[in-house]
Structures are given as structure tokens and as C-alpha cells.
Image (tube, rainbow, N blue to C red):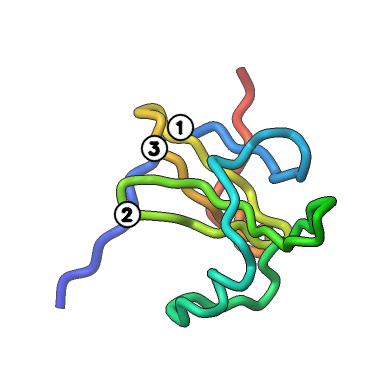
Amino acid sequence: MKKYIRNAFEVEAVAYETGKGMEDGFMPWNSVVTTGWIQTENLIKITREDGMVMCPFIQNRRGLIFLRKGDYIITEMDMERHACGGDKFFDRYHQIDE
């Protein structure tokens, strides 16, 4: 089997913070849980004033990416966005000086 290494390319990244408008939207917690195709461990849950619990997400060409505690939102040069856990972020990315 052939082996490959990921090409290096520049991205912008920022640690996710609630209340900063960084997400593309929210989905009710009960909808996230009942879909059954996503692990719910460490998902960020925000309780609205009306008591509804919501989960923030970003959207890209592959679908919805629900944000977890400690995630970084990565924006590639073509504006495609992804999430990377804080536990893996600094193994995969290093800061460059400008």
C-alpha cells in the first residue's frame, strides 16, 4: 500500500468561543441526539432563555460539523472551514511569523 504525507498549506485558525458569532448556526440538542450518527461526548451545549438547549455548528461541503469543547475553527485559503480538537491542533499546526 502506498503512503502519503499531507501537503503543507497556510490556514487561519481561532479557538471557538461562545457568543462571538463564529458558528454558522445552532441545532437543538434533542435533534442532535436523535439523529444517532454523531458522538455527543463533549459537544458544546448552550441553553437559551426559553430553556431550549442548542449545539453550535459550522457547515462545509461535507455537511454540518458540531463544535466540541476546545475546538479550533480552521479556515483554509478558499474559505472552506473545518474544526480540529484542541488536543490535536498543535500536533498538526504550528504558528508562522508574518
Pick the residue in front: 34 or 13. Answer: 34
Circle 2 sits in a helix, a strand or a loop, which is it?
loop
The answer to whether 85 is drawn above or below residue 42 in the figure is above
The three-letter code of the residue at mark 2 reads Arg
Q: Which mark is residue 51?
A: none
The answer to whether 15 is drawn above or below residue 12 in the figure is below
Q: Which residue is mark 1?
A: 10
Q: Is residue 50 left or right of residue 87?
A: right
Counting from the top left corner in percent of width and height, residue 97 is at 63, 24
**Which of labels 1 and 3 is toward the front?**
3
Q: Quadrant of the N terminus?
A: bottom left
Q: Earlier in the sequence, mark 1 or mark 2?
A: 1
Q: Is residue 78 left or right of residue 88?
A: left
Q: Earlier in the sequence, mark 2 or mark 3?
A: 2
Pick the residue in front: 26 or 13. Answer: 26
Q: Earlier in the sequence, mark 1 or mark 3?
A: 1
- Measured Cα–Cα span from mark 2 to mark 3: 10 Å
- Residue at 54% over, 40% down: 24
Q: Which residue is mark 3?
A: 80
The answer to whether 1 is drawn above or below residue 93 in the figure is below
Counting from the top left corner in percent of width and height, residue 22 is at 64, 36
The three-letter code of the residue at mark 1 reads Glu
Circle 3 sits in a helix, a strand or a loop, which is it?
loop
The three-letter code of the residue at mark 3 reads Glu
Crowding at mark 2 (Cα within 10 Å: few <14, some 14-19, many 20+): few
Circle 1 sits in a helix, a strand or a loop, which is it?
loop
- Measured Cα–Cα span from mark 1 to mark 2: 21 Å
Q: Which residue is mark 2?
A: 62
Counting from the top left corner in percent of width and height, residue 21 is at 67, 34
